[in-house]
Amino acid sequence: MSAPKRFLVKNISEETVLCGEEFNHAKNVLRLSEGSEVTLFDGNGAEYGAVITKIGKSEMILHTVRKGISERDPKADMYLLVGALKGDKTELVVQKATELGVRKIGVFSSKYCSAYMNENKFSRLNRVAAEASKQCFRASVPEIFYFDSLEKAVLSAEGYGDKLFACEFISESEKEIGEIGKSVALIVGSEGGFTREEFEFAKGQGFQGVTLGKRILRAETAAIAFLSVAAYFTGELK
Ligand code: SAM
């Protein structure tokens, strides 16, 4: 038997109303009927088993039957900061980062960054994070932030136990990724990469440079590879 279908609802109570896109998906795409069992999650880590009790034209009512504990939510506290990427590459990174277990994602602009951000793109990133959380069985959806400079992005990582900066122009890492703890902030640049001043600024705020090898990786490859290795060492891939 396949796992119950999952729906993201901000306010879950004993009788929960499902409307909008989630309602449409449940009724018209999945064709769920009254009596079907589903899972509701609130995006903040809470998950509930529920039964559809009434289906109307524009909403359905679900009766919450039990509170579940999401075993699949990230235990480590990983924060990915990534330069805004061209086309739909930022969405790709947000999707993969969600699956790999980040709790927070910061997208930033920097000196050599040529992609821009607007309200539509930002909403789309949040939708991608919600969709990916649903698909990978997380009960929490990563928070997404936008910073209009690298400096603001760097400052937003204050308090993390380890702070690593993927730097394309260093040949030796200042910290081994294998030595990180469970609280870590990671910075990866956009297609244009970083200036030396940006790297120095981040170092002044406690970031340590990391090389990802001899080859220059595309920004999205670098983000996913860097995060995958960090996720492994924080225990999120076990
Ligand atoms: N435009 C830059 C250049 O010509 O050297 C390359 C930027 S690279 C496409 C985008 C980002 O991926 C970099 O800013 C860095 O964060 C990361 N990156 C790519 N390859 C890397 C490597 N070998 N070591 C560390 N970081 C790397």
Image: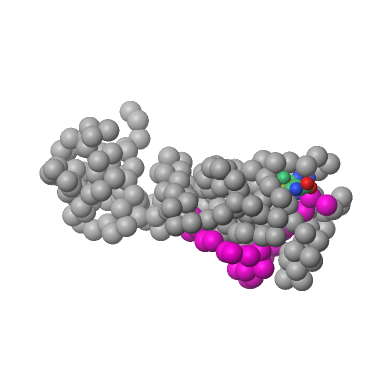
In percent of width and height, residue 82 lies at 62, 54
Left or right: where 121 falls relative to 32: right
Residue for point 33% across, 28% down: 1
Q: Classify 38 as above or below 151.
A: above
Q: Identify which residue, 171 or 51, lies in the foreground.
A: 171
Residue 144, magenta (yes or no): yes
Is residue 34 something that shows in the picture?
Answer: yes
Toward the top, the furthest residue is 1
Residue for point 43% across, 53% down: 120
In percent of width and height, residue 93 lies at 57, 45
Q: Magenta segment range?
A: 142-169
Residue 226, magenta (yes or no): no
Left or right: where 206 falls relative to 143: right
Residue for point 62% across, 59% down: 109
Left or right: where 178 falls relative to 68: right
Q: Identify which residue, 156 or 184, lies in the foreground.
A: 156
In percent of width and height, residue 118 lies at 48, 56
In percent of width and height, residue 29 lies at 27, 33
Q: Classify 221 as above or below 63.
A: above
Protein image colouring: one colour
Residue for point 47% across, 51% down: 121
